[in-house]
Image: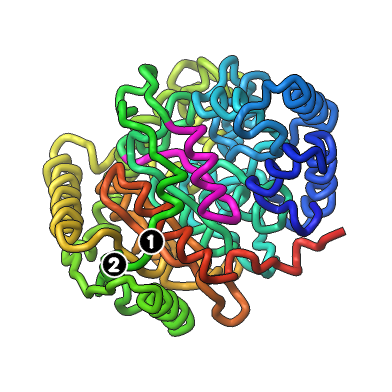
Amino acid sequence: MSESLNTVVDQLAALAAGQTTARMLTEESLARVAATQGSLNALISAVGAEHALAAADAADQARASRQAGPLSGIPYAHKDLFCTEGVPTTCGSRYLEHFVPPYSAAIHERISQAGAVLIGKANMDEFAMGSSNEHSYFGPVRNPWDTERVPGGSSGGSAALVAARVVPFATGSDTGGSIRQPAAFCGVTGFKPSYGRVSRWGMIAYASSLDQAGVIALTVEDCARVLDVMSGFDTRDATCADRPRVDVDAALEMPLKGLRIGRPRQWFGSGIEDGVAAAVEAALAEYARRGAIIVDVDLPSSEYAIPAYYVIAPAEASSNLARFDGVRYGHRCSDPKDLNDLYRRSRAEGFGHEVQKRILTGTYALSAGYYDAYYLRAQQVRRLIANDFARVFAEVDVLAGPTSPTVAFKLGEKLSDPLALYLADINTVSVNLAGLPGLSVPCGFSEGLPVGLQLVAPSWREDLLIGAGHGYQQATEWHWAEPAAGARP
Ligand code: GLN
């Protein structure tokens, strides 16, 4: 990709001005895949040059006949949990290694209709369970800033692809931070919309009451443009809400002056690295210089967010993953003795260790006798967390703090300590428990590694995140920083 054509907005402008073609952009993207796949392992599968170039040519023809859609000719990748008709969809799992969906996810329909060109399916933690992308059956993804380090997870492939300038945007899903945390670790922008903003139809479920599709790109403006295409009512997802569209153009114009930003004390607690705290405080100071008002606030129930999340998410996962039974689709063991043997061995062989662990803990939490002690209690905590947010949003417009308490850690560093890995999500999971929209924008570096600033708004107020995030990116350059590793050809 040429230096000036890294973003969706720039590519669209160049296409409209006839300075490039969808074919040229797609060829460049394919060349970037070839140059980076060996070092990053960010894709699980590529759709193939022939297929991608045919879609690019169709986009060029549509533009020539003035039928171009809002993303016509823009190359992109899907996290590999969005079903794509005729294109393998693995969810990072051996269980679905050979699964080719007979239908497409709602967001794939929308993005294809808008004219974007699918390059491939991005690597991810198996069934979106993880924060480091080390739980993929297809091997870990590496961070383009330092290939000895993790890219974050579970949408690590999507974040690495955008950071390495392979594609200008990639889709992701966020159940407890899986868009925002990898975006932070890879120095790119990640946007998780309000629960219900984007249809989950055709997105392989992890924890249905928390899962939300979103996008990773270099800038807030790009994220907003893509989300505008992805969002909208869909009768096939009963939790998809019929809400008015966000006025993206108006949101991008929002002044920072007078914006009330809450700084939750609990997000700056113990465990936060000094370099991360310093970068985030500098970002808040930048906001203050631009006329925003910074107010300290309290979210006292946040300390219970991780335990509540790690009861609710596995409980829902244990139920969602019951459909993988070795009978209907996906992995089937060979020569089963009887039906129980078929279930047992198909699941034991098809699911990795982390997924099995979560199915077990989830099943336990839901079992008669323990339901009240664990699941019900976690749901009560969830309500307290949502109430905390509602209270502070009576005082402030948005909240700001570190997306993650640390920068990207080394591969293998936390694998033997699952609790440490779960704590990587400490600032993001409460946002999912409350169903709120959240954004991570690059805000500096600590020891050469990117730091993310998390912004959170009340439900359906994506406009505030777009305004606050874009305003910050107008004033700063962090989102343009480009990793050297990932090796440009
Ligand atoms: N890291 C969290 C988990 O493992 C969040 C994952 C996600 O958002 N999909 O559950």
Amino acid type for the residue under numbered disc 1: Pro
Magenta stretch: residue 151 in it? no
Residue in the picture at 16% in, 62% down: 395
Compare residues 32 and 421 and report the one nearer the observer: 32
Residue 213, percent from left and from top: 45, 39
Dot 1 surroundings within 10 Å: few (below 14), some, or many (20 or more)?
some
Residue at image mark 2: 258
Whether residue 175 is visible, yes or no, is yes
Residue in the picture at 36% in, 23% down: 237
Amino acid type for the residue under numbered disc 2: Gly
Residue 74, percent from left and from top: 69, 38
**Residue 54 position (above or below residue 94):** above
Q: Is 128 left or right of 7, judged from the image as shown? A: left
Residue in the picture at 39% in, 56% down: 254
Residue in the picture at 15% in, 57% down: 394
The number of callouts visible is 2
Which numbered disc covers residue 255? 1
Give the residue at the far right of this rendering.
489
- Spatial separation of the CA atoms under disc 1 and disc 2: 8 Å
Q: Which residues are magenta?
A: 210-231
